[in-house]
Amino acid sequence: MALQQDPRQNHLLAALPKDEYQRLAPHLKRVELTLGDSLAESGKVMRHVYFPVDCIVSLLCVMDDGDSTEIAVVGSEGIVGIALFMGGESTPSRAIVQSAGSAYRLDGQLLKDEFDRASTFQYLLLRYTQALITQMAQTAVCNRHHSLDQQLCRWLLLSLDRLPVNELVMTQELIANMLGVRREGVTEAAGKLQRAGLISYRRGHISILDRPGLEARVCECYTVVRKEYDRLLSFHRPG
Amino acid sequence: MALQQDPRQNHLLAALPKDEYQRLAPHLKRVELTLGDSLAESGKVMRHVYFPVDCIVSLLCVMDDGDSTEIAVVGSEGIVGIALFMGGESTPSRAIVQSAGSAYRLDGQLLKDEFDRASTFQYLLLRYTQALITQMAQTAVCNRHHSLDQQLCRWLLLSLDRLPVNELVMTQELIANMLGVRREGVTEAAGKLQRAGLISYRRGHISILDRPGLEARVCECYTVVRKEYDRLLSFHRPG
DNA sequence: ATTGCTATGTACGCCAGCGAACGGAAGCGA
DNA sequence: TCGCTTCCGTTCGCTGGCGTACATAGCAAT
């Protein structure tokens, strides 16, 4: 159905006034992304940005020894490729598809041109970037102060907020990569949540059974990020 | 002497073309900052931005239980108050003076006006913000993967890069607050560095004796941030 | 159904950093 | 000079997460 093909399922695109959107629309190309796809590599100049509609993209810092840590996630509320309008054209982090789905791709130069019109688009992208900064800052704090259990809750909730369904396709191994911890640690933490009846796990599929229960366990980091996203990004879809 | 009073000791101001600088100059007010001064409080709307010249400002996330963690530091290469041009007007983090010195203060509305001219100023501020993002991301990674010893090295080097001298006035208690660890942990880590002849500690004063030695011990996080700052912020002072 | 791979569960020793408690010493002010 | 405050050093037991190793169990392809 038509709605399924609407770029305006992405919140940033949805918030654009008509004229700005119509300038961009012809250049938005729908792309299907599958788990593990890379949208940006460390230090590599980016040629496009991506507006997710129903996928989730992780921003990961990768270390010399191969260990990685997720520093933020992006879903339909955002955009992948902020370095293009911030001016750096690349970042030291990678962008990896964490949950398969669709996105709309836009050429980097067109993005910059529209950004430089000092339009609503610029306003939206900058506010979004500030929200993203908050997420990264809170990730740093959480890494320092909170238990793996709580971090897993935070991670699950952040992912759920960006998905239309209550299930995510994700192995414990992958979650461990995201959080930058051991796989065994995730097994144990997930086991606790499962025994508490909050989630149900089966071979690469996590179902959330009791979201309020998760929210009761999660550390404040999730709430801080959530509120800041609401505050900064609660613009209305224009007529 | 006159140079001491030059706002262009701040690199961002220094990089402005003449006309843009002259629009701002009359509104830049020099302020003396002392250790512990707060330039921004969590959630509070900011009225000014600050361009440090020889002080260091820490951006801290404070948790409900009072624990805090530094997510980035700002010196003469940057600006405190990015939320003002990013659009949010406030952030969930605090900005605290970590090393006393001077800065130039600018009214938030004037900043926004100049930013919205889509001028060099905007270009510089956005690039700086991207560098800051890298610092925050790398802080998150470092918090996850590296030992307190290495983090202390990283912290010392990041601070040194922003100071004209080889000594910092800083108690171990404060460093612990910044890093989000116990004071005893800092004592131990600093003791190792001292025994290795890299630093010398005396009651609130740290002298760096062997900077290459520190660089040899520090984790890659420092290097990544350093390189990204160099890459993004190596613009020339215009005639 | 069998095979084989991948995902998950569990166990064990290890260590960095935590929390708490205390002693000593450097500096400051009276 | 004395006394008080702040800062630094050290200890001890504890625990969360690490590294390693191995055992089971879904799922898919043959």
Image (spheres, coloured by chain):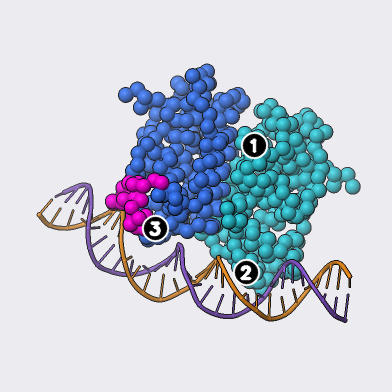
Chain colours: A cyan, B blue, C purple, D orange
Q: Amino acid at mark 1?
A: Glu
Locate the C terminus of chain A by quadrant: top right
Callout 3: SS = helix
Q: At x 77% / y 40%, what residue is drawn?
A: A105
Q: CA distance from mark 3 to mark 1?
A: 38 Å
Per the image, the residue denoted by label 3 is B189
Q: Is residue B109 visible?
A: no
Q: Which residues are magenta?
A: B191-212
Chain holding disc 1: A
Q: Amino acid at mark 2?
A: Glu
Q: Is residue B174 above or below residue A203?
A: above
B107 sits left or right of A235 in the view: left
Chain holding disc 3: B
A166 sits left or right of D8 in the view: right
Q: At x 56% / y 30%, what residue is drawn?
A: B124
Q: Is residue A206 above or below residue A221?
A: below
Per the image, the residue denoted by label 1 is A89
Q: At x 56% / y 44%, what residue is drawn?
A: B134
Per the image, the residue denoted by label 2 is A184
| Label 1 vs 2, first from the N-terminus | 1
